Image (tube, rainbow, N blue to C red):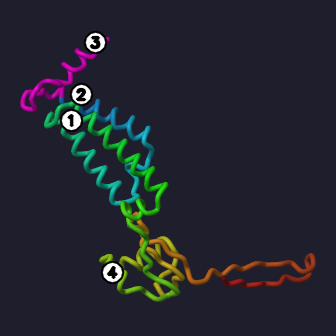
Amino acid sequence: MQEILSAFGQALGVSARASELTMAQVSLRAVTVFVFWLVIVRLAGRRVLGKYSGYDVVVSVILGAILGGAISGAAPFWAALTAAAVLVALHWMLALLTFRSHFVGDLVKGHPRELVRDGVVNETAMRQNFLTEHDLVEMLRLHARVANPSEARLAVLERNGEISGLPRSILRVVEIGVQSGVQTVRVELSS
């Protein structure tokens, strides 16, 4: 087993300086880091790369830098993989802490901000979050199916950076047959 690991380390150029790495060694490093990262992501879950919060993005960027260093030889190969695994474990522990504590969750991820209530836009919240009315209208069209903020009951800038919304009223049409084949009553309900 030791011989296999030694041969693999030599094939990766683990002890070589970056300038001494061959194209084959860099390619094998890329494949190894890819497989390593795929295993880590599968173990850690989709959240590591999901669009959830600023700290998720920070972890992803740092992981990219660490793993890029492992591929290019800018960082010691095994040390870089170990650092990546430690960072993912830290991310996972922080996610667990934010799950268990709202205070830690707000501290790390922030908190939602109300942008519209009953059709009235909160201009202060819009300015504080550097959002234009065009941003708000676009997200309301996409998520709340309303064309104008005045049609929204609620719009919130969520912790993941997306804007969610609820329409002011939902019109439901229910048709009720009063007598079989004789008459139909149409009732429109608004909430």
Instruction: Classify mark 3: residues with Cα within 10 Å, few (<14), some (14-19) or many (20+).
Output: few
Magenta part of the protein: which range? 1-25
Nearer the viewer's eye, disc 4 or disc 3? 3
Q: Mark 3 points at which residue?
A: 2
In terms of secondary structure, where does tag 4 sit? loop
Q: Name the residue under label 4.
A: 132
Q: Distance between the residues labelled 1 and 2?
A: 11 Å
Residue 115 position within the rendered picture, expressed as x and y whole percent measured from the top left? 43, 80
- Residue at 32% x, 11% y: name it: 1
Q: Name the residue under label 2.
A: 28
Earlier along the polypeptide chain: callout 3 or callout 1? 3
Q: What predominant SS class does the magenta segment belong to?
A: helix
Q: Is residue 67 magenta?
A: no
Q: How far apart are marks 3 and 2 (CA)?
A: 19 Å
Q: Is residue 11 magenta?
A: yes
Residue 2 position within the rendered picture, expressed as x and y whole percent measured from the top left? 28, 12
Query: Mark 1 is on which residue type?
Result: Ala
Instruction: Classify mark 4: residues with Cα within 10 Å, few (<14), some (14-19) or many (20+).
Output: few
Please give left or right for residue 109 compared with residue 10 in the image: right
In terms of secondary structure, where does tag 3 sit? helix
Rendered position, 171 above or below 46: below
